[in-house]
Amino acid sequence: MAGLVFGTGGAPHSAKSSSIAGIECIADLQLGCMELEFVQGVRMSRESATLVGEAAAKTGIKLSAHAPYFINFNAHEPEKIRASQDRLLQTARIASLCHAESVVFHAAFYLGDPPEKAYTTVKKYLEEIISQLRQENNRVWIRPEIMGKLSTFGTIEEILNLSTELERVAPCLDFAHWHARSGKSNSYQEFASILEQVEQQLGRAALDDMHIHISGIAYGKKGEIKHLNLKESDFQYAELLKALKNYDAKGIVICESPNLEEDALLLQATYNTL
């Protein structure tokens, strides 16, 4: 098996709207993974989730899940923190029934707080989630995502530190987001140094089980503006794939370009020629 498998964020455009149709379409396209998008809320019953898990097992497609966007572990109102925790827990429970291995989420906004203060707050509330999932014997990995806007919590350091300090927490490395946020990080050497940073801090095991997001990206002074198709963007995806191959990275790569499966297939084909 290839070190990395490629797929789409949500069902491919060519699939009918259900998650099961999406999984079957991914298999037909000869891609290897799919992220279930619960970004507007977790609207899947336990029964449906069990059927999704069966479809994934039958086709051999690896699944992950993306939690709702309405999560902010640095909110200043206690009820918003509780709602954020509930949304992440809900996603993890359904993801587990779907046989998804990971739940990706956007952790927080700084809201004018110093990053160190936001980090302490996020860690505290995330720790409570991990503890609850442990009690439920839920084995999914919780993956805070590297974010593209300067106003959002989610630098490489923040995400790697959370992954070091909390068990069952691992990074979702969105390289396009980091390119948009940093205004650089778009060359083979820079991609390689990120992979070295991951290995140094989290060990080789982290490179053997990666969760990666890739898309084209438009950005400005404040970071990310929107996702683009790869060929409409300056993002050097071939250089990234080369670094991933050379470091023998393994895991799943989710394409979040607007054209979804088209760019997922482009990434897979490019990777396979390296």
Image (spheres, grey):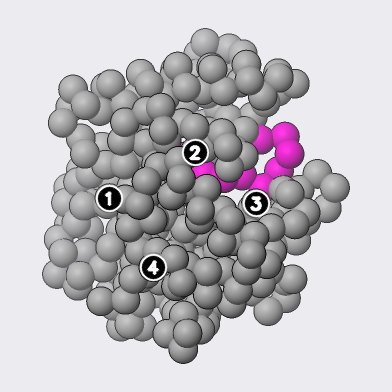
Alpha carbon distance from label 4 to label 2: 19 Å
- What residue is shown with label 2? 160
The residue shown at (60%, 73%) is 239
Give the number of callouts.
Answer: 4
Amino acid found under the numbered disc labelled 3 = Trp
Q: Are marks 3 and 4 in contact (CB under 8 Å)?
A: no
Q: Of tags 2 and 1, which is closer to the observer?
A: 2
Residue at the disc numbered 1: 101
Residue at image position (46%, 80%) is: 271
* Residue 78 in sight here: yes
Query: Marks 3/4: CA distance?
Result: 21 Å
The residue labelled by disc 4 is: 248
At label 1, counting other C-alpha atoms closer than 10 Å, the crowd grade (few under 14, some 14-19, many 20 or more) is some
151 within the magenta span: yes
Query: Magenta residues?
Result: 143-152
Give the alpha-carbon distance from disc 2 to disc 1, as whole Å. Answer: 19 Å
Q: Which mark is residue 178?
A: 3
Name the element at disc 1.
loop
Identify the mark nearer the N-term, 1 or 4: 1
- Please tell me whether mark 3 sits on a helix, a strand or a loop: helix
Mark in front: 4 vs 2: 4
Q: CA distance from mark 2 to mark 3?
A: 13 Å
